[in-house]
Amino acid sequence: MGRQTVVQITCDRCRRVEHRATSEAMAPLKKGEEPHYMFSGTYKGDQVKFEDLCSGCESILDNHWAAMTKQLMKSSPIRRKGKG
């Protein structure tokens, strides 16, 4: 029978508990080391940070991020005065 070392995470968004295969990114923090956030963002002074996300919340965030940035990444139309 095969064995695998896993890490238990608790989602910062919904508090769901999940088990994931270990990786270097999930290694315990050293003293004084800043945590690695899966997502962090600031808009108009509101700040959101998620260190751990379950697969469901990560998928939701992926979809929202894609929808939000799709329109932002398009080039702005050139507006000319007196034309149109």
Image: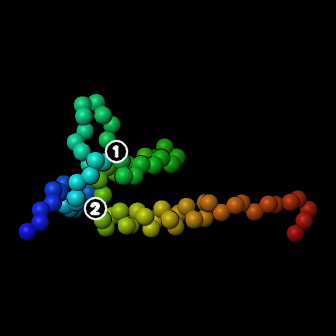
Question: Of the residues tagged 1 and 2, which is closer to the observer?
Answer: 1
Whether the residues at callouts 1 and 2 have beta carbons within 8 Å, the answer is no
Q: Position of residue 11 (x, y in %)?
A: 26, 57
Q: Could you tell me which secondary element the residue under label 1 belongs to?
A: loop
Camera-side residue of 57 and 46: 57
Q: In this picture, is 26 found above or below 14?
A: above
- Residue 22 lies in quadrant: bottom left
Residue 24 is left or right of residue 49, and the answer is left
Q: State left or right for residue 47 relative to residue 83.
A: left
Three-letter amino acid code at disc 2?
A: Cys
Q: Which mark is residue 54?
A: 2
Location of mark 1 (residue): 36
Q: Residue furthest front?
A: 1
Residue found 48% across the figure and 62% down from its top: 65
> Dot 1 surroundings within 10 Å: few (below 14), some, or many (20 or more)?
some
| 33 lies above or below 59 | above
Q: Which numbered disc, 1 or 2, marks the residue that appears first in the sequence?
A: 1
Q: Quadrant of the N terminus?
A: bottom left
**Is residue 9 visible in this depiction of the protein?**
no
Question: Front-most of 31 and 6?
Answer: 6
Image quarter where the C terminus lies is bottom right
Disc tally is: 2
The picture places residue 2, in percent across and down from the top left corner, at 11, 66
Say which of 10 and 19 sits in front: 19
Q: Kindly give the residue lying farthest to the left in the view shown.
A: 1
In percent of the image, x 28 and y 47: which residue is there?
A: 24
Q: Look at label 1 and name its amino acid.
A: His
Q: Horizontal and vertical percent for residue 32?
A: 28, 30
Q: Residue at x 17, y 57 (%)?
A: 6
| Left or right of 80 on screen, residue 34 | left
Relative placement, left or right, of 21 versus 59 is: left
Q: Separation of disc 1 and disc 2 at Cα?
A: 15 Å
